[in-house]
């Protein structure tokens, strides 16, 4: 007569631990890709917002300013007719376009964008050249992946690397 065995054999336990290790490592890799996607999204969002600023500037008779700001865990592009800093009240919605979450760091010409602070951009209507704003915006993910938005003041050109 065979005795009934209860529990797991050592081999079964090793196999289960190996499967769990593989799944955990795959999950860690996917989180890294998500952080990279966050940084890429914010960088390309800023680039797209600068193109939108150019369109708005060329289509209106008055000045248009774009403010890049961080508010309650997200980055926003807000368009106004003044270069005065944008103030957003606690709990109030931001009247602008959300660019991404603050799981990334945004640095404009070597200075980190402060919580609640903003950076202003403006273009000259006649030739599209930048009259205000930094020349370089670095967007860095928590895993170290970095995207840079370059702005060329004399021509109004901008691109992401």
Image (cartoon, rainbow, N blue to C red):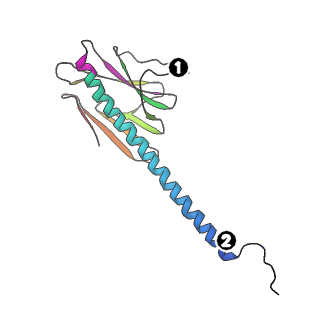
Number of the label disc, if any, that sits on residue 92: 1
**Is 37 contained in the magenta span?**
no
Number of the label disc, if any, that sits on residue 115: none
Residue positioned 78% across, 74% down in the render: 6
Earlier-in-chain disc, 1 versus 2: 2
**Magenta range:** 56-71
Instruction: Note whether 3 is above or below 58 in the view shown.
Output: below
Q: Nearer the viewer, residue 148 or 53?
A: 53
**In this rendering, would 97 be left or right of 20?**
left
The x, y position of residue 95, in whole percent, is 44, 20
Q: Quadrant of residue 23?
A: bottom right
Q: Is residue 1 visible?
A: yes
The x, y position of residue 131, in whole percent, is 25, 22
Instruction: Note whether 20 is above or below 103 in the view shown.
Output: below
Instruction: Note whether 58 is above or below 135 in the view shown.
Output: above
Q: Nearer the viewer, residue 59 or 44?
A: 59
Q: Quadrant of residue 135?
A: top left
Identify residue for label 2.
Answer: 13
Q: Is residue 110 visible?
A: no
Residue positioned 48% across, 55% down in the render: 29
Q: Residues within 10 Å of mark 2 (few under 14, many from 20)?
A: few
Cα separation between marks 1 and 2: 53 Å
Can you say which quadrant of the picture contains the N terminus? bottom right
**Is 60 contained in the magenta span?**
yes
The local secondary structure at tag 1 comes to: loop
Can you say which quadrant of the picture contains the C terminus? top left
Work out which residue is located at the far front of the displayed protein and give it.
1
Q: Nearer the viewer, residue 51 or 146?
A: 51
Q: Quadrant of residue 138?
A: top left
Work out which residue is located at the far top of the displayed protein and give it.
62
């Amino acid at each position: 007569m065979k005795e009934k065995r209860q529990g797991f054999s050592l081999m079964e336990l090793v196999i289960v631990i190996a499967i769990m290790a593989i799944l955990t490592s795959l999950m860690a890799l996917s989180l890294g890709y998500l952080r990279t996607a966050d940084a890429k999204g914010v960088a390309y969002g800023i680039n797209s917002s600068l193109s939108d600023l150019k369109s708005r500037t060329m289509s209106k008779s008055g000045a248009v300013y774009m403010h890049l700001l961080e508010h309650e865990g997200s980055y926003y592009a807000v368009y106004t007719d003044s270069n005065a800093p944008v103030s957003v009240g606690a709990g109030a919605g931001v009247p602008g376009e959300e660019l991404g979450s603050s799981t990334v760091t945004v640095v404009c010409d070597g200075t980190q964008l402060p919580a609640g602070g903003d950076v202003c951009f403006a273009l000259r209507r006649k030739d599209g050249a930048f009259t205000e704003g930094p020349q370089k915006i670095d967007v860095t993910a928590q895993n170290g992946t970095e995207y840079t938005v370059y702005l060329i003041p004399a021509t109004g050109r901008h691109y992401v690397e």
